[in-house]
Amino acid sequence: MILFSSDNGPEDYHIRNAANAGVGSTGPLRARKRSMYEGGIRTFGLVRWPGRVAAGRRDDEFVMSALDWMPTVASLAGAPLPAEWAGNGEDVGDVWLSARRPRRTDLHWEWLFRVVGEPAYTPPMLAVRSGPWKLFAQHDGSRVELYHIPDDPGERRNRAADEPAVVSNLVAKAREWQASLPPAEARARVAATGQPVDGRPAAPIPAAERDRRRQMFRHKDADGDGRLTEEEFIRAGRR
């Protein structure tokens, strides 16, 4: 069996110390790396297992998490999980082998740190995916955003005002999950200031370097829209 999955989200071009800054496109998805919007967390996976996993089969509906790798691979290999293992993932081996079903467990995220890039890349600090719904909220239950991901993968239409029952249920789930996490210094700082934590403050960029980057970006941004697509990046490298 060969398994492959990419890293989450392409790096933002504001990151000065990354060789791959600005490379890659999230297409219609919102945001980039470090954001809990789909552009920052959604990626693809490949499974090759001749004779067991059908070649060429594609599933664009099932939602899998990295949390699922351990129970899934152990199950398919016939290996019992360690007695002390207490992960939150589920065995999705049946889906790999062609089953069609919805995910049985919810997925949760918490991101306490600054999200690099455009202001629209920064969601509230808690997120939960339950069935087709994805909800964001602050730790106190405020600033709620609700998206129906199958119909709105770009997370453009906030449905919170239209679905109060869904919001109430998922906010409760998100806060209950967050309360189960171990204490963290970053969370205490967020609670005290109400602001994301800047985990690694960037050193000041010299003016000459800043100007050089602006010129390089303008050179690559062929249509001048202020965004760098994968096609523009590749085309600039060929010139």
Image: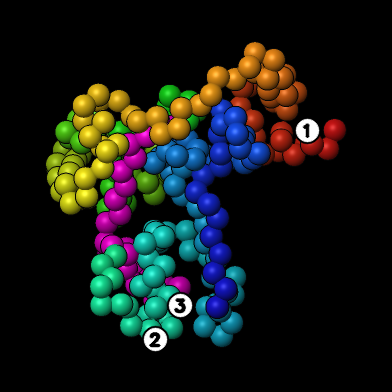
Residue occupying image coordinates x 29% and y 50%: 108
**Height in image: 141 above or below 60?**
above
Marking on residue 97: 3
For residue 98: magenta?
Answer: yes
Residue occupying image coordinates x 37% and y 34%: 113
Task: Decide which of 76, 213 is in the foreground and name it.
Answer: 213
Q: Amino acid at mark 1?
A: Ala
**Height in image: 1 above or below 144?**
below
**Height in image: 204 above or below 65?**
above
| Mark 3 or 1: the one toward you | 1
Task: Answer with left or right where residue 82 lies relative to residue 15.
Answer: left
Q: Amino acid at mark 3?
A: Leu
Residues rendered magenta in the picture: 88-115
Upstream in sequence: badge 3 or badge 1: 3
Marking on residue 236: 1
Q: CA distance from mark 3 to mark 1?
A: 42 Å
Residue 61 percent location from the top left of the image: 42, 59
Q: CA distance from mark 2 to mark 1?
A: 50 Å
Q: Amino acid at mark 2?
A: Gly
Quadrant for the C terminus, please. Answer: top right
Quadrant for the N terminus, please. Answer: bottom right
Residue 210 percent location from the top left of the image: 65, 18
Q: Secondary structure at mark 3?
A: loop
Q: Secondary structure at mark 1?
A: helix
Residue 157 percent location from the top left of the image: 35, 33
* Prevailing secondary structure class for the magenta stretch in the rendered image: loop
Q: CA distance from mark 2 to mark 3?
A: 15 Å
Tell me, yes or no, if residue 161 can be seen here: no
Within the image, what quadrant is residue 79 found in?
bottom left
Task: Decide which of 230, 149 is in the foreground and name it.
Answer: 230
Residue indicated by mark 2: 78
Within the image, what quadrant is residue 152 found in?
top left
